[in-house]
Image (spheres, helix red, strand yellow):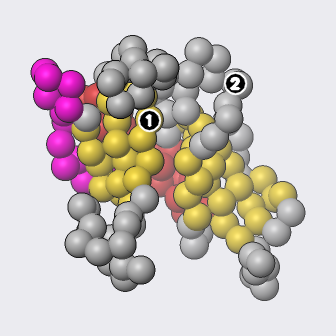
Amino acid sequence: MANSYEMPPREGFTITYFITVDDIDRSADFYEKVFGGRVLSRGDSRGASGHIAIANTWLIVNVGGGPTPDKPSVTLSVPADPDMVSSFLNIRVADIQACYELWKSRGAEFLTEPKDKYGETRCYIRDPDGYIIEVGQSKPGFAYG
């Protein structure tokens, strides 16, 4: 297993997250401004996707479209109803209140302020296309697994 977060990986694998967006530049700007991401590419007119390095992961953004030879039955689109989700990006932070204040000042639209739930404090952001991003901080002494 690789011990680095190289893209592309020289050994093993790296996980990235892909989202379908209406506007690559708008999404790249959002993830750069709010989370301090580094825009690696903004795609091109031939359909190449945009790539943003954020913390220890990469986010791929691209516009939707119909089936392609490698996914013949799949159509990509932004969420039809942003209140109906089946997955979301999850960001774990060391200080949720500091992140809440900083990211809010950078334009993030939170659904609520941070709230206690189970062994953590968490809140949610909506990105420009309606995707949900969970921001959570584990409570002291809480361990997973």
Residue found at x 39% / y 14%: 66
SS for tag 2?
A: loop
Dot 2 alpha-carbon crowd within 10 angstroms: few under 14, some 14 to 19, many 20 or more: few
Residue 58 highlighted magenta (yes or no): no
Magenta-drawn segment: 37-48
Along the line of sight, the residue nearer the viewer: 121 or 78:
78
Q: Looking at the image, which residue sits at the far left?
A: 45
Tell me the mark number nearer the camera, choosing from 2 and 1: 1
Relative to 81, is 86 above or below?
A: below
Q: Residue at x 42, y 21 (%)?
A: 72
Q: Position of residue 126 (x, y in %)?
A: 56, 34
Separation of marks 2 and 1 at Cα, in angstroms: 16 Å
User: Is 123 placed left or right of 132 in the picture?
Assistant: right
Which residue is at 59% across, 53% downward?
90
Q: Residue type at mark 1: give it.
A: Ile
Q: Quadrant of the N terminus?
A: bottom left
Q: Quadrant of residue 15?
A: bottom left
Q: Quick check: 99 above or below 72?
A: below
Residue corresponding to mark 2: 83
Viewer can see residue 77:
no
**Residue 134 visible, this orientation:** yes
Q: State the residue at coordinates (41%, 28%).
A: 71
**Residue at mark 1:** 19
Q: Is residue 42 magenta?
A: yes
**Dot label at residue 86:** none
Mark closer to the chain start, 2 or 1 = 1
Give how far across and how far down residue 79 sits, in percent.
56, 22
Q: Position of residue 86 (x, y in %)?
A: 68, 35
